[in-house]
Every structure is written in C-alpha cells, then in structure tokens.
Amino acid sequence: MAKVKSSGKEKKLIEFYGDGCVHCEEMAPLVGQLEKELGVKFEKYEVWNNMQNANMLEEYDKGRCGGVPFFFNTATGEFICGAVDYETFKKWAIKG
C-alpha cells in the first residue's frame, strides 16, 4: 500500500482490472465482500480491452505499478498494486 497526494475530490474507490487476469480474479471476491460489508461501491474499469480505461489507469498509476489489479482511494491518495489479503484491503478502503 502506498500513498500519493490526494486530488481533494470526494472519496471514490477505484479498481482497474484486466479480463482474464488471475490476480484480478483473486481480488474479485474481496471487492464484493468489501462492498457488502462496508456498503461501499467500487468504480471498476477493465483496461486490457478498453484503451480509454487504460489511459485513465496510466493517469492514476503514474508508472508506479504498471499492471493490474490496481486500486486507488481518491480520499487518501493511497493505492494498492496487485493482490493483497482482506485485512490490508479493508484498512485501505475505510481510510478517508
């Protein structure tokens, strides 16, 4: 989990993923669990088949991770690269 300067926008939890990405599929149940448990909603963007979404990923990633899954919390500026355990993911999501 890492942090970058927040844009000051309202809190959004954003997920960038690729269709068929093993690590993205590994995180999907955790995303669903967080949405259900915390009542949050992720904005989800598929990047391997959608160039507009891929460009948006580059804007958020800024070369830090270079892959998916990539999660970004707009309230804190913190991001997660790749798959993580549920407790780490939950702590990241509730901040801000």
Image: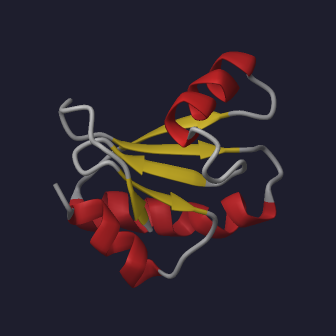
Vertical arrangement, residue 67 with respect to residue 6, above or below: below
- x, y percentage for residue 39? 23, 55
- x, y percentage for residue 43? 43, 37
Q: Is residue 77 left or right of residue 17?
A: left
- x, y percentage for residue 10? 18, 33
Colour mapping used in the image:
secondary structure
Toward which corner of the image does residue 25 lie, by quadrant? bottom right
Vertical arrangement, residue 19 with respect to residue 37, above or below: above
Give the position of the N terminus as an image quadrant: bottom left
- x, y percentage for residue 9? 20, 29
Give the position of the C terminus as an image quadrant: bottom left
Write the residue at 30% across / 41% down: 74
Q: Is residue 40 left or right of residue 53?
A: left
Vertical arrangement, residue 79 with respect to residue 22, above or below: above
Q: Is residue 83 left or right of residue 20?
A: left
- In the image shown, does 12 or 35 lie closer to the viewer? 12
Write the residue at 64% across / 54% down: 69
Write the residue at 22% across / 64% down: 94
Q: Is residue 38 left or right of residue 52?
A: left
- Give the total number of marks visible in the rendering: 0
Q: Residue furthest top?
A: 52
Write the residue at 33% across / 66% down: 92
Vertical arrangement, residue 1 with respect to residue 16, above or below: below
